[in-house]
Every structure is written in structure tokens, then in C-alpha cells.
Image (cartoon, grey):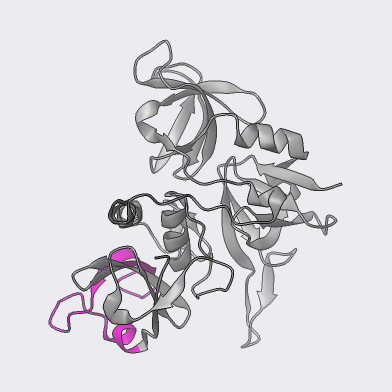
Amino acid sequence: MEQFAVIIKPVITIWDRPEETKENREKKIVSSIADEGIYGMGLRIRGEEEQGFYPVVTAYHYPGYVRKEDVELTGLSALVNWEEGGLMVIDGEFVDLMSLPKVQGVRIMSAPRGALIKVLEFESMEPGWALVELFDGQRGFVRNQYLRPKEYSQSGLWTGKLPQKEIVDEKEFRQAVVENAMQYLGTQYRWGGRTPLGIDCSGLTSESYLLSGIIIFRDAKIQPGFPVLEIPKEEMLPGDLMYFPGHIAMYMGNGRYIHSTGKIGSSGVVINSLNTEAADYREDLAKSWYASGSIF
């Protein structure tokens, strides 16, 4: 019988093995962080508990391990009910869930952009406040200006397929994913991160696409089975992706791109240019840029 789980903390680490550290190629000890999970997201359990970790796979088909205290185990029917029960996406950097529909309420939880929460009433007894419910049934209130529709499906957890939203207007979609990425501008670089607390290069691109209903590969490469296909560099349009060794960026148009970089002195989510005369030109990236990709 398949088992599933829902993330019950605002942000959790997803590890690439059931331990916090590993030895890298240079024989140095580094973290085994692979990704992050955000409140309300579902997971499929893919094996037995190991040393306090569950082996899991995410709805965007990324495997890893999570600490058992970070999730609540559940069955398929409960997960489907959660998925189809009116979920919306938190759309503020970090948003408070309050006990009352007013700022003087008790803070129940704070959740980052990308968290999933069940909305019972978008406009509750107090204008501007939504009545919401957590996975454990606890209710509270969130300012509805910080909620956006959930455009992607987590059904791949139980179907094994990658569900993708039908794109009706290509230009509108491209603009939306660029705007999603721009919301993280200035966020610090965090290895494996995917929230406004810290985000890495593929976390930025994959989360920007996910928020608009399209599931692309979580890492910085073009992966078979996912919708991004290589295109000629000169055919790039806004929202397309740029690939470098171990790095990925999103093209914005007019020779500019947005990415999350760990470069000393220019770390975090920044915008750079392909124009050699521009002050924000990155020669190292321009020379190592080996491919472009698009879902179109």
C-alpha cells in the first residue's frame, strides 16, 4: 500500500541521503542538502524509514530524504482531499497565519511564498482576510492579498505522470514566469533553497515555472522527460532558460537575465547582461553559457 506525507513546517530541508553531511570529490565534508520543501506540499514515501529519515519523491519528481518530524504521514485519499480541497498559494515573502482576522491576533504560523494552504472563505467576516485551514484542521486567517491561485497539480505523486497546465497565451505565460522570478530579486543565495529565505539557481527557475503551472526539472540541466527542450541561443524569448556548467538562469529579454548566484560580491538573485559594454556584464557566464532551453 502506497504511503504519502504532507510537509507540516514552513520550510524543511530535503537531503540527498539520510544524513546531514557527506564527503565531496575533494574528500571534504559538506552538507547533503538537495532541495527544500514548503508547507502543504505533498510527498510520496518511497521506502522504509532510515535513521529518522523518510525516502521521498516530490510532486515535481525530485527524490530525496526528509526528517520524519517535518512531515505528517497520510494515505492517498487524505492527500487527494487536501489537493482538491481548495488550496491556494501563499504569495508574500513570509506571511502570518493569525488566530483572528486582525493584526492583533495570535500568530499561529508564518509561511513563505510557495506554501500551500486550504482556503475556506477568501473573503471572511472581516474584509481583506481569508479564513484558512492547515493540514491538521487548525483554522486561522490570512490577508487575502497574499494568496494566489494554485496553478499546478500534485497528482503526479499518485499517477507517476508530470501534469502540466495548458498554456493558452504564450506571451502572457512568458511574462508571468519572469514576474515570478522578479519577486525573488535580492533574495540571498542558499544551496538547495526555493523560498524568499534563500534560493539557489534552479530553485529560482523551477519555482517560477511551478507557480505558473509548469513542472520543469529541479536541477541546472535539460533533463529528458521534462518539458524544456534545447533551442538555438538566438531564438530565446523572455522566460526561456540559459544553461551553464552547474548553473541556470532565466532570460528576460533585451540581453538581460535573472539568476541566483553564489558569486562573492554579487551574491543572491540578481540581474546581469549579455551586453559586453554593460556594467552588469558577467564575462565568466557569457563564455561558459553552453545551451538555451524552452518549453515552447
Task: Please state the horizontal and vertical placement of residue 52, each as a whole percent of the image.
Answer: 79, 54
Does 202 sit above or below residue 148?
below
Point out the residue furthest to the front here.
168
Q: Nearer the viewer, residue 184 or 188?
A: 184
Residue occupying image coordinates x 22% and y 79%:
274
Q: Nearer the viewer, residue 66 or 213?
A: 213
Q: Which residues are magenta?
A: 258-287
Q: Nearer the viewer, residue 190 or 254?
A: 254
Task: Please state the horizontal and vertical placement of residue 47, each as a whole percent of the image.
Answer: 82, 57
Q: Nearer the viewer, residue 295 or 207?
A: 295
Residue 196 in the magenta stretch? The answer is no
Residue occupying image coordinates x 38% and y 34%:
146
Residue occupying image coordinates x 17% and y 84%:
276
Q: Quadrant of the C terminus?
A: bottom left
From the viewer's perspective, tell me whether residue 98 is left or right of residue 232: right
Task: Please state the horizontal and vertical placement of residue 157, each as a whole percent of the image.
Answer: 68, 50
